[in-house]
Image: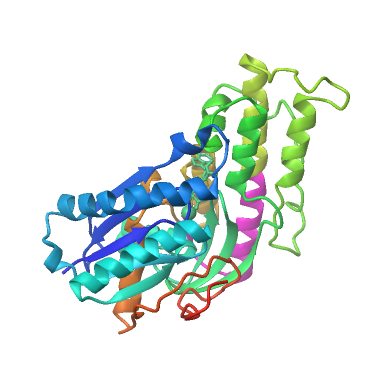
Amino acid sequence: MPLLAIETTCDETAAAVIDRARRVLSSVVASQEALHAAWRGVVPELAARAHVERIVPVIDEAVSRAGVSRGAIEAVAVAVRPGLVGSLLVGVAAAKGVAAALGCPLVGYDHVAAHLYACRIAHGDRAVWPAVGLVASGGHTSLFHVRSPLDLERLGGTIDDAAGEAFDKAAALLGLGYPGGPAVERAATGGDPRAHRFPRPLAGDRDRLDMSFSGLKTALRYRIRPPGAPEDRPPPEGRARADLAASFQQAVVDTILAKVGLALERTGCRVLMVGGGVAANTLLREALEDLGRRRRVAVLVPPRELCTDNAAMGAIAWERLERGENDGLELDITPGTDRRRADAPPPGGKRP
Ligand code: KG4
Ligand code: ZN
């Protein structure tokens, strides 16, 4: 009997049906990209309202595409952290409604741990723990020692902007659309990644697993519009833009790669699991796979649709169900990112 997973942490309204063997029977994602494009970033209030409009049709579609009856659903899973408060609340309220109506267990899960669990769905038995986990998305860029799917220790990560956020800001500076990652990647095609030497702060510091991307964004800004240049100067186009985009993308990838290598050395893990929207980036995927070949480490990167936000990765809830765990209808959200153990029960009662 399958599990229904619901995901509304940020700006994608998603639902999926996954069976106990971790087979994805359906996965529906309603993107809000068009809604937030004018602001070149996610507007939390708009995101929450859009989730309210979409959540019921998205759940209905996931159940119908899975070809199962509602009564066949064994449990309902929902991402409860981290994310935007209003967005998380819509998903949790919907999940409670469905669980109460069907009289089945309700299980909360951690969105970041779920991004890494996408490797289990995509790669089956090749996904073995312990592993180093890299989650690079719009909200997170972190390295973990993943002892088991639910036991993550954060080793380091960005101390300022997330990698995806840096891509989004770079896209805005280059006059490209939102979301920025795919737009910068496209613009970089044919560009020279060595045309501009952008900073890679902390990348050479072998004592820390931290990364920083905000200086890189500032460097790009000054390269496009040097101090004193008119604010209304239009962004570069053609070859100049391609060189800037390629050099920026290379700097992000180099920074991430340096710390992934260090994390593998420190932990001695032979498996690297990768997740999050930035893992859809071809240059990063290829660089990680190359690193894996050189170091004889198994690099697991899910297909692109399992890297960006989706509910199929909510299959991680099976790990809790199989331990006999579930949350009652008092399940609550924990928007912050400071929780290290993905299986820690969310605090009941008060909302932060
Ligand atoms: O995981 P995700 O869908 O949502 C969050 O949990 O944040 O990640 C979205 C982020 C955005 O910042 C987007 O620009 C970035 O992932 N992204 C990419 C690519 N596709 C999405 N960044 C670089 N290259 C891409 N191809
Ligand atoms: Zn995400």
Q: Residue furthest top?
A: 238
Asked whether 40 or 118 is in front, the reply is 40
By secondary structure, the bulk of the magenta-drawn segment is best described as helix
Residue 257 screen position, x and y as percent: 61, 50
Residue 327 screen position, x and y as percent: 36, 79
Q: Is residue 341 visible?
A: yes
Position of residue 74 in the picture relative to residue 251 (left or right): left
**Looking at the image, is 45 positioned above or below residue 119?**
above
Asked whether 174 or 288 is in front, the reply is 174
Residue 180 lies in the magenta-colored region: no
Q: To which quarter of the image does residue 329 belong?
A: bottom left
Report the quarter where the C terminus lies: bottom right
Residue 269 lies in the magenta-colored region: yes
User: In this picture, which residue range is highlighted in magenta?
Assistant: 254-275
Q: Residue furthest right?
A: 228
**Looking at the image, is 199 positioned above or below residue 10?**
above
Q: Residue at x 64, y 42 (%)?
A: 166
Asked whether 314 or 232 is in front, the reply is 232
Q: Residue at x 73, y 33 (%)?
A: 220
Residue 1 screen position, x and y as percent: 15, 69
Report the number of discs.
0
Residue 209 screen position, x and y as percent: 68, 62
Position of residue 254 in the picture relative to residue 102 (left or right): right
Q: Is residue 275 visible?
A: no
Instruction: Give the color scheme: rainbow, by chain, secondary structure or one colour.
Output: rainbow
Position of residue 199 in the picture relative to residue 140 (left or right): right
